Each structure stands twice: as structure tokens, then as C-alpha cells.
Image (cartoon, rainbow, N blue to C red):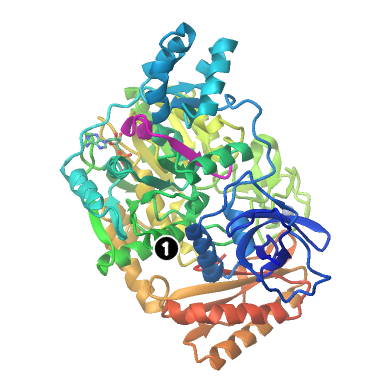
Amino acid sequence: MTIARVALPVAAHTAFDYWVPAGLEVGCGQMVRVHLGRRALAGVVVAIGEATEVAGDKLQPVREVIAALPPLPPDVLAMAEFVARYYQEPLGLVLAQMLPPLSAALPRSPVAVAAVALTAEGRAALPLRVARAPRARALLERLQATDGATLGADAIAALTPRARALLRAWLTHGWVAPAIADPMPALPLPPLNADQQTAAAAVVAALSSFAPFLLQGVTGSGKTEVYLAAAAAAIAAGGQVLLLVPEINLTPQLAQRIAAALPGRRTVLLHSRLAGGERRRAWAAAAAGDADLVLGTRLAVFTPLPRLALIVVDEEQDASFKQQDGVRYHGRDVAIWRARQRGVPIVLGSATPSLETLAQAQRGRYGWLKLPRRAVLPAVLPALRFEPGRDPGAVEGLGTALLAAIEARLARGEQALIFINRRGYSPSLLCSACGWQAGCPRCSARLVVHRNDRELRCHHCGHAERLTRACPDCGNVDLMPLGHGTQRLEGALAARFPDARIVRIDRDSTQRKGAFVAMRESVHAGEVDILVGTQMLAKGHDFPRLTLVGVLGADNALYSADFRATERLAALLFQVAGRAGRALLPGEVIVQTDFPAHPLYRALAAHDYDSFAATLLAERRLTGLPPFGHLALLAAEARDRGDVDAFLAAARAAADAVALAAALAVDVYPPVPAGLARRAGLERGQVLVQSAARGPLQRFLPAWREALERLPGRRVRWALDVDPAGFS
Ligand code: ADP
Ligand code: ZN
Ligand code: ZN
């Protein structure tokens, strides 16, 4: 009897055995449907054998082979096993994470896609076939007329029904394929400058072997052109390229540049916000080797790519590469593992590399490619000024110097960006009579005033209540919003500059689908004078008329207890500052701070990330924190503080026992409350484990996890986070 071992998406660290009915073709990597007890589940076959320990009457059959997806190739299965082992997650959950959703139906008409483009096969086959069919010839000419041969949604909608039917037929033949973007005017690609050429050549020379690179380039230095030049070479040599980006918001501009750099090549987009069918189609195109380039967020790292030749991780330092719930993997780190596994180069690009990556480059383990200059005029980086936020002329946190600088931009028809990393109106509401502050009933956090919606909201659990007029404790009606958020600044700027066109960009203002893209377009079109926003504005946007960046409230992050907070703040500020003066106009950055002498601000003024990174690295070395040590965090939560404390105390004792028994050099810290001690009604705590080397920690974790699974504590939810992003 053939037995299939199936990894199922359940919280169990074992696979399950099923017998394979005659006539079912089941191999490793195949998706199948089975029953677990009475539950119907989809899982992945991870082994085929002849024997099982499951008793004959308990053994169930494989119910169905899911043919909609091709089986996972061995290298992807091996990657899943690595992720499961490294992050201490059940293999079935890891696999479920890697696969595109099965449930969503395919769109009825394949032309219901945003855009289509000619494929290489189409280019070869169609000219002959349409020779004597005028309608088809006209359609082909339409496709060829656009550079990148892409037909956008509007153009498709405007076609006659017969032309659309033709397009559908061509899609089925594979002569056209869904493309990622509407046709945009193809950007003429600049010739690479000397630094870019050197960098691209180094990557190209390393194609076909494992070679990690740090590409460190100041903002505006043209890292993207280097990625694309290397990608073009890899694809020309018959390879596929995986390009990972932190956020999909970045991709429209990027998609346009890819189309220009890789004419006639097929790019697919993969991220979690795609409709299930779209994601499945893109995944299948990559897995079949049809797509030349996969552009995606962290989950795209798991895409099967038979001809993989190059991996690029843009903004490699970005925190969003780390998944914070479910399977807590780090997309960049998995990408590095995969590059090694497949023997291909990987380029980690950043203006502000993570300390992990920087340390590897310094040790000579990664090739270190540098783009020290901006690629476009003005070749100079913006000038920085530090100004106090509290001066007598300040208006709602906007100091006199900043107000004057904004005024000057308005007079010259240039744009200003005001950055504050806080959405809402003000981060708290205070009673000036008795000292009451509006707090979340479910979290140990303050409620944020959202004046536009007349609400108080918790940014941790989503709790919302009506904005109160009177203090619930003393009845005082003079409640004071304390501190500044984007809404408040927007209001203050509108009052101060009534003729200016102001746009606020934060998570609240961009909730509607397409809102962010529309806003960015209007900034580009010069329809906006002042932008106010959070870190959504910091990355990847090139606004040619933007010449002033004002930074407010950055000092707050200097006091954070999180060991990565200053590193993050540094990356963010270097990025924000890099938004000023990207095209022909010189830029200026004004940072409002009470600590202008802080090493971070001094480094920012000198455009010298490396010196600040060196300071941070020295601190990390002293404290044994990453990259000089390795961490795992056990986070637990429960209704009762007592349950959390008891569980964590037992967890710590178990950890000590495991480390002692195996003589492993790991340090186990006493349990502490989490940074946010209560969230959504749950008390939270954590135990940190630290080790100087990865080996002992990796040997320690499986044994500790098994011990944790045996601990009593039904009322406690817990999770292990390997290489945690921070202590939250
Ligand atoms: P980065 O990602 O390093 O911040 P980008 O790749 O976004 O920089 O490039 C910034 C700008 O410089 C883009 O508008 C790009 O078209 C332009 N650019 C890049 N390389 C060159 C070059 N060699 N010559 C002229 N302009 C360039
Ligand atoms: Zn009061
Ligand atoms: Zn809350």
C-alpha cells in the first residue's frame, strides 16, 4: 500500500499518514485534500512510503489531488523545511503560507486583468497568423505600438467585443499574458554612470554562483538601475529574477521602470493584497518558468522559480520583511538562504543597511558595492538645519524657521513635505483640571484623538469611542489634546496657508483602494503644495518639485526601550531627508529637535550613515545584541496576569533545564511584561533567550519548544519569535 505523508495547516509539528487509493497520482510536493478527523483540509505531500504506524482502521485515504497547482519542486520543499526548522513553526503552516490561496475562483474572463502584454511566443507566432485577418492585425499593431507592448485596462475596455474575444483567445494560447501595469510612458533609461556600471558588472560577473552583495547607495544614487541592469543580464542568459520590495505601494513607479528596462519580458506581481486568482496565476506563471521577473513583497520569496538566476532585496533594512504574526519569518534572511541553496547571487540594496548586513560586509562575507553619489542633478545631498520646535512664534508645533521655509516654497511654486510619524489629531487627551487622560479600556495605552471623525481611537486594538466633551472624572469641559499628529498639522497648515493645496498621507487618509496612488499622482502633477504625512511618505517616491522636508517629533523615538528603535529612526530620517531636492532643484531639510547634538542628528547632517551605524554596532557588540548575538523571544498572553506570570516562570525554568542538559551556551532572562503590557484585554509578557552564536540557540530551540508544548497553561497563548524585530 502506498502511504503519503501530508503536512497539514495545523499547529502540530508532525505530518500525517494517508493511504493512496489506486489511480491517484501522488508525488512529493503535490497538494492534496484529506480529512483530519472530520475536518477536510488541504495539505502538501512531503514523503511517499510503504509503511505507517497508524492502525489500519484509523488510516484514511487521500481524498483528492489538487491539480490546480503544480507540485512544489524539491528545492521549495527544502526551503519550507528550513523555515519550519529555523523559526520553530509547523511545516504544514509554513507550506500553507507559501502557497497561493486555493479558494478564490479564477476571474471568469481572463481579460478582466489590469493589463496584457505580448509574450515572446506571441511576437514569434502572431505576425504570420494575422497576415490575412485585418481585425487581428489591427489588434496586434495596437499591442506593438506601445513600448513594452502592454495594453492597459482602459484600452482593453475600449476594444470592440470581437477584439476582446480575440484577446481572450490569445491569452489562452499564451501569446499575450497578464501584465502588471497600465501602459505608462516608458521612461527613457539613463545610461549607467561609472559607479553603477562597476556595481552591475560585479553582480553580473557572479551570476551562476552564490554571491551575496550589499549595494549601499545614498538616496537617489540609482540603485534601481543597477538591479535592472543585472536583472536584464540574468534574464538574457535564460534566468529568472526575484525582486523583493518592502511595500507594494512602491511598485507602480518601479513597474514602469522595469517595463522600460526589460522590454518584452514578462513580469508578474506577487503580494498578499492581490485577489486569490491573480495571485495564483502569477505564482503559476513563475512556477512554470513563464515569468522572467517576479516583483513581490516578502511572501514572494517562496515562489517556485525553476530558472532562478538572481535575487534582489530592495530596502533590505525594512522592518516589513519580517512577518510579525503567524509564521514569523524574515523575508530577507530566507532570501539569502535561498540564494545559497540555488547557487545564485543576491543583492541587498539600501541607503541605510541593517546592522546585520553591514556587519557581514565589514567582515568581508558580502561583496560591498557603493554608490556614494546621487545620479541626478543636483548631485549634492540636501542641506540640513536643526531648529527648536518650541519657540514663541511656533504654531501647533511648527516652528518659525519651518514656517518661513514653507512660505518661501509656496512663493516659488515648489513643494514641501512635513513628516511626523503619528497619525490622528493628537496622541492623547488630557484633563487640565484633574490630570485624567483618555486611556484604552483594553490596552495599557492612551487613546488617540481623531478629531475629523469625532472619535478617540486605540492604535493597538482598534477600540473606538466618541470624543468626550467633559472629563469623566471631574466634569471639566476644558479637555486638552496633547501633542501633534498628522491631522492636527494639516489643520494648522491650512489655517496658516489658506491658499496652499495640502494633502495628508497616512493610513487613515489612504484606506480607500487606489487613494494612495491617486494622491501620489497629484503630487507628481504639481497639484499639491504641501504634503503632511507619516512614514508612508518616506520611501521610494521621487517628487521632482519637492525641495523642503520638515521633520517633527523624531525625538520621541530616541527614548524607546526597543533595541532597534534608533536604527529604525536613523533609516527613516535618512530616507525622509533623501526626499528633498531629487531633481533639478536643491533641497533643504529642517529637523525640529531639542537634541541637535545627538550622534544620530550629527550623522544625518553629515550624510554619514556609516559613522552612526558604527556607533550602534559598538553598542550592540558590548551588549551582545544582533548582529553580535542571537535572540529568540517567547511571548505569552492571557486574560489573567497571574496565568501569564506562572506560564513564563515555568517556561524559564524549562529553558534553564534544556540549556543545562545539553550544555548549551544560551542565556535565559527572567520574564518581563511586554512593552505594551496589556493589549486587547490580554496581559502580555515575555522571556528573552540570547546566545553569542547561532548554533547553540538553534539546538536549544526545538527542545525548548517541545518543553513549552508540554507545559500546562490552557489559558495562555504563546509564540516563539526567532530573530525578533524588537521587544514589543
Ligand atoms: P535610489 O533607489 O538609489 O534612491 P533610484 O534608483 O530611485 O535611486 O534613482 C533615482 C533617480 O535617478 C531616478 O529618477 C533615476 O531615473 C535616476 N537615475 C538613475 N541612474 C541614473 C543615471 N545613470 N543617469 C541619470 N539619472 C539616473
Ligand atoms: Zn478632570
Ligand atoms: Zn486598545
Dot 1: within a 10 Å radius of its alpha carbon, few (fewer than 14), some, or many (20 or more) residues?
some
Q: Label 1, on which residue?
A: 337
In this picture, residue 13 sits left or right of residue 489: right
Which corner quadrant of the figure contains ligand 3? bottom right
**Quadrant the C terminus occupies:** bottom right
Q: Is residue 263 magenta?
A: yes
Q: Is residue 76 above or below residue 141?
A: below
Q: Position of residue 587 (x, y in %)?
A: 29, 37
Q: Is residue 34 above or below residue 640?
A: above
Q: What kind of element bears circle 1? A: helix
Magenta includes 146? no
Q: Position of residue 484 (x, y in %)?
A: 54, 45
The percent coordinates of residue 620 (x first, y second) are: 38, 72
| Mark 1 Cβ and ligand 1 under 8 Å apart | no
Q: Nearer the viewer, residue 661 or 437?
A: 661
Span colored in magenta: 257-273
Query: Is residue 391 visible from the viewing direction of this image?
Result: no
Please tell me which residue lies in front, 66 or 368: 66
Q: Amino acid at mark 1?
A: Trp
Q: Is residue 187 left or right of residue 154?
A: left
